[in-house]
Amino acid sequence: MKFQCSIVISLLLLQCLAVLVASQSFDFFYFVQQWPGSYCDTERSCCYPTTGKPAADFGIHGLWPNHDDGSYPSNCDPNSPFNPSEVSDLKSSMQKNWPTLACPSGDGQKFWSHEWEKHGTCSESVLDQHAYFELALSLKQKANLLQALKSSGITPGSSYSLESIKDAITEAVGYTPWIECNKDSSGNSQLYQIYLCVDPSGSDLIKCPVFPKGPCSKEIEFPSF
């Protein structure tokens, strides 16, 4: 009986160790914000949240642990599901700054649950659930992308060179972003998501060790919303 118990305890310890190792194994975060006009102006379209149409501002997509070689961990802790009560004090700010645009309309909890369980659980060595969402919200305030673009004369409703958009953000935040584009309903390249990099403690923006793949056109649309 004692032998069987020791086996069970050993297996549980190994499982906990595996989760801990997975959650510690990353080199930096991608902090990703998306432009709602580009999410919605596609063939798939979008659905506004049940709280109503979001503001015409960049919204948080996620805070993603990554490796320097371009790979990333995911779904690191199946025993740590999203718990709305853990972030109840952040809910109104999350609805404003991290809105869902997926169909059918939702209140955001499905979106936040996906982000926590796929990405957030891989940063549990430094951030618990509340700290993870709180950090993403604070990073959005630190990296005010719309203001950065407007300060350089880049406003929604026109097309701009990719380099001018990068330069405007670099000047404002001090680091070069990576720009992800998608195609609008007419097939034109448009500004979709902006990636910045954060050190593994979540303390500071840093130079990105690696950029994702996927080029934009030299001239891209910045659609209205």
Image (cartoon, rainbow, N blue to C red):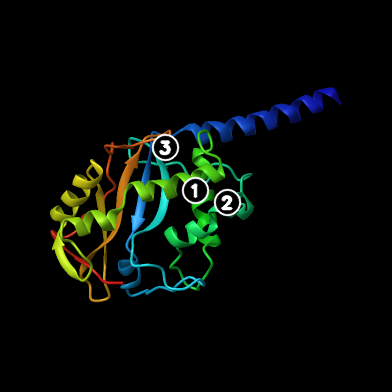
Q: Position of residue 146 (x, y in %)?
A: 27, 58
- The residue pinned by badge 1 equals 133
44 in relation to 182, above or below:
below
- The residue pinned by badge 2 equals 87
**Nearest to N terminus: mark 1 or mark 3:** 1
Q: Residues within 10 Å of mark 1 (few under 14, many from 20)?
A: many
Tag shown at residue 202: 3
Q: Is mark 2 on a helix, strand or loop?
A: helix
Q: Position of residue 136 (x, y in %)?
A: 43, 48
**Nearest to N terminus: mark 2 or mark 1:** 2
222 to the left or right of 108: left
Residue plotted at (23% across, 65% down): 190
Are dots 2 and 1 in contact, CB under 8 Å? yes
Q: Is mark 1 on a helix, strand or loop?
A: helix
Q: Which amino acid does label 3 sit on?
A: Gly
165 to the left or right of 26: left
Residue plotted at (18% across, 61% down): 154
Q: Where is residue 117 in the image (x, y as percent from the top left)?
A: 54, 49
Q: How far apart are marks 2 and 1 (CA)?
A: 8 Å
Q: Which amino acid does label 2 sit on?
A: Val
154 to the left or right of 92: left
Q: How far apart are marks 2 and 3 (CA)?
A: 18 Å
Q: Position of residue 199 (x, y in %)?
A: 37, 35
